[in-house]
Image: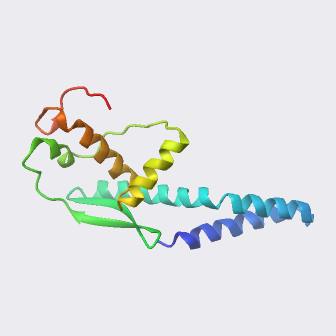
């Protein structure tokens, strides 16, 4: 993906919409500062869209795993064939279908830490969180590949 081009186009569009208010230098300066300040948020939105695309593509390719990885700072969808379920019970959850959803409300600092950790490992945020939860649940006995007991995170 070319996120820089998408962000630049959105910034141009915001500036063009703002031009409707007239040509007051103070307003132009304030709008320019606002658009520049929005750049990190725009990049994050693009990454979130890539994550959603990976989920949607993954749903269409049940025999494959779709992850968002960063290559040269740009999000890329990586599609790999699913392998046979692991022999040990602790990794059996990765063979399950990803059809359950949880919405988490996190402090911004924790969300940023999770995003940084995922980027560092070359994984999507979703894959990183699933892996972190799975690692924490390894001590839990599983039956048929599904977690059958409650556990503390």
Which residue occupies the extreme top position in the image? Answer: 150
Q: Nearer the viewer, residue 71 or 84?
A: 71
View extreme (right): residue: 24
Give how far across and how far down residue 122 sits, in percent.
Answer: 36, 62
> Residue at 67% of width from left, 58% of height from top?
38
Q: Residue at x 76, y 66 (%)?
A: 15
Residue 3 visible somewhere in the drawing: yes
| 54, above or below 108, in the image | below
Residue that appears at 87% across and 60% down? 27
Quadrant occupied by the C terminus: top left
Judge whether residue 53 can be spotted in this image.
Answer: no
Q: Position of residue 83 (x, y in %)?
A: 14, 59
Residue 99: percent from left, percent from top: 29, 43
Q: Is residue 1 above or below residue 98?
A: below
Q: Nearer the viewer, residue 68 or 153?
A: 153
Q: Position of residue 37 (x, y in %)?
A: 69, 58
């Amino acid at each position: 993906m070319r996120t820089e081009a998408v962000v630049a186009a959105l910034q141009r569009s915001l500036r063009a919409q703002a031009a409707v208010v007239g040509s007051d230098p103070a307003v132009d300066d304030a709008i320019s500062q606002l658009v520049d300040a929005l750049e990190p948020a725009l990049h994050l939105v693009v990454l979130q869209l890539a994550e959603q695309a990976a989920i949607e593509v993954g749903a269409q390719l049940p025999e494959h795993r779709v992850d968002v990885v960063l290559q040269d700072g740009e999000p890329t969808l990586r599609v790999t064939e699913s392998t046979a379920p692991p022999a040990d019970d602790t990794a059996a959850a990765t063979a399950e279908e990803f059809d359950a959803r949880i919405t988490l409300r996190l402090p911004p600092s924790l969300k940023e830490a999770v995003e940084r950790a995922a980027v560092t490992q070359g994984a999507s945020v979703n894959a990183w969180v699933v892996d972190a939860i799975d690692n924490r649940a390894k001590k839990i006995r599983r039956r048929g590949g599904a977690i059958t007991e409650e556990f503390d995170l």
